[in-house]
Amino acid sequence: MSLPRTHRCPACSARAPAPEPVLHEDIVVGAPLSMEELDEAQLLERFGRKYAHDGCRVTEVRRVPSDTLSGYAWSVRFIENG
């Protein structure tokens, strides 16, 4: 299963741009197993392409426990620059 082509954040898209940066966090389930082999910079770049809408910038990607078959998901924190 691949990452979604684009990320649609209701908090980013449903309102006028924020006057200050806003921190968001998404949990991504079902990312390819090959993601485990990437280092921090590669993870930021890979997820960053998916969140590059509306001026959003990924600041952190980390593996977190999940009730999925793999046992984990990816926490993606990103900033909406407004």
Image (tube, rainbow, N blue to C red):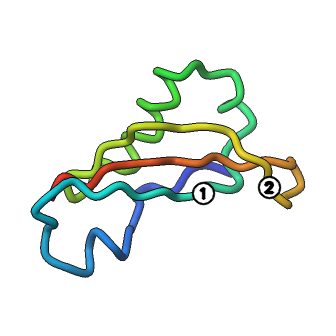
Q: List x then y, in percent, for residue 81.
A: 18, 52
The image quarter in which residue 10 lies: bottom left
Q: Residue at x 51, y 47 (%)?
A: 76
Q: List x then y, in percent, for residue 9.
A: 38, 68
Which residue type carries mark 1?
Answer: Ile
Q: List x then y, in percent, for residue 14.
A: 26, 80
Q: Is residue 18 above or below residue 47?
A: below
Q: Quadrant of the C terminus?
A: bottom left
Q: Residue at x 41, y 30 (%)?
A: 45
Which residue type carries mark 2?
Answer: Ser
Residue reaching furthest front? 20
The image quarter in which residue 6 lies: bottom left
Residue reaching furthest left? 19
Few, some or many residues within 10 Å of mark 2 (<14, 14–19, 20+): few
Which residue bears the numbered disc 1?
27
Q: Is residue 21 above or below residue 64?
A: below
Which residue bears the numbered disc 2?
66
Residue 42 in the figure: left or right of residue 48: right
In this rendered view, identify the residue nearer to me: 13 or 34.
13
Few, some or many residues within 10 Å of mark 1 (<14, 14–19, 20+): some
Q: Secondary structure at mark 1?
A: strand
Q: Residue at x 26, y 73 (%)?
A: 13
